[in-house]
Image: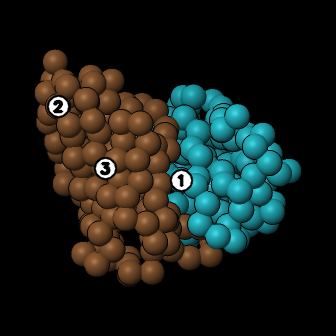
Chain colours: A brown, B cyan
Amino acid sequence: GEDVEQSLFLSVREGDSSVINCTYTDSSSTYLYWYKQEPGAGLQLLTYIFSNMDMKQDQRLTVLLNKKDKHLSLRIADTQTGDSAIYFCAESYNAGNMLTFGGGTRLMVKP
Amino acid sequence: DTEVTQTPKHLVMGMTNKKSLKCEQHMGHRAMYWYKQKAKKPPELMFVYSYEKLSINESVPSRFSPECPNSSLLNLHLHALQPEDSALYLCASSQDTASPYEQYFGPGTRLTVT
């Protein structure tokens, strides 16, 4: 079955760049997503990338996809304290639009 | 408008109670989802509705009963729950399920079963 993995924790200083990594096993993934979850809240869709793309940039966010290595990353430029949250990567690969989530990376931004 | 709303925000119920969670979206989406999220874990899919019909039930116990009265509303009826059912229940919607479309999540209902 499909499996999506993320490191548990990342700590950065305000103003630095953050890079959150994700690996997946299903080579038929078609869409890959990044969601942000603040404490006690739902999931906010940040960005997504088609599997035929290598990179997508959206303001402070850059998504890189290495399809050969099945590796996805989210770079947040000029990280702010408001970026502190849990970040989930997720893949969707089939009709039925079922998401498989990674375990989440907790980002802590220190002032 | 990419908003999915859920009520109530918090719910405490006893094991013999019957309660319902509600979810609403006005984006014209034809797919709606219920997820369960335990603390420090990713969301787990429970049910998928496509065009108001139940299309996926991820082997969820019958004490959870979903209902889709119309294309904008999704309910989750709860009866005889166990303390281990305490979790954040998230609703999501997407354009449909025929292709991978981004899912938009509501803020969740935090359920505590006593």
* Label 3: few (<14), some (14–19) or many (≥20) C-alpha neighbours in 10 Å: many
Which residue does the numbered mark 1 point to in the structure image?
B35
Q: Residue B93 at what x, y percent from top left?
A: 66, 51
Which residue does the numbered mark 2 point to in the structure image?
A16
Query: In the image, which is nearer the foreground, mark 1 or mark 3?
Result: 3
Task: Residue at 16%, 42% (x, y): give it.
Answer: A10
Which residue does the numbered mark 3 point to in the structure image?
A74
The amino acid beneath tag 1 is: Tyr
Left/right placement of residue A67 relative to residue B36 reads left
Q: Are both tags, 2 and 3, on one chain? A: yes
The amino acid beneath tag 3 is: Leu
| Marks 2 and 3 in Cβ contact (< 8 Å) | no
Badge 1 marks a residue whose secondary structure is strand
Q: Residue furthest toward the right?
A: B70
Q: Residue A104 at what x, y percent from top left?
A: 30, 50
Name the one closer to the observer, B35 or A71.
A71
Q: Chain of mark 1?
A: B
Q: Residue B17 at what x, y percent from top left?
A: 63, 40
Task: Residue at 80%, 48% (x, y): give it.
Answer: B28
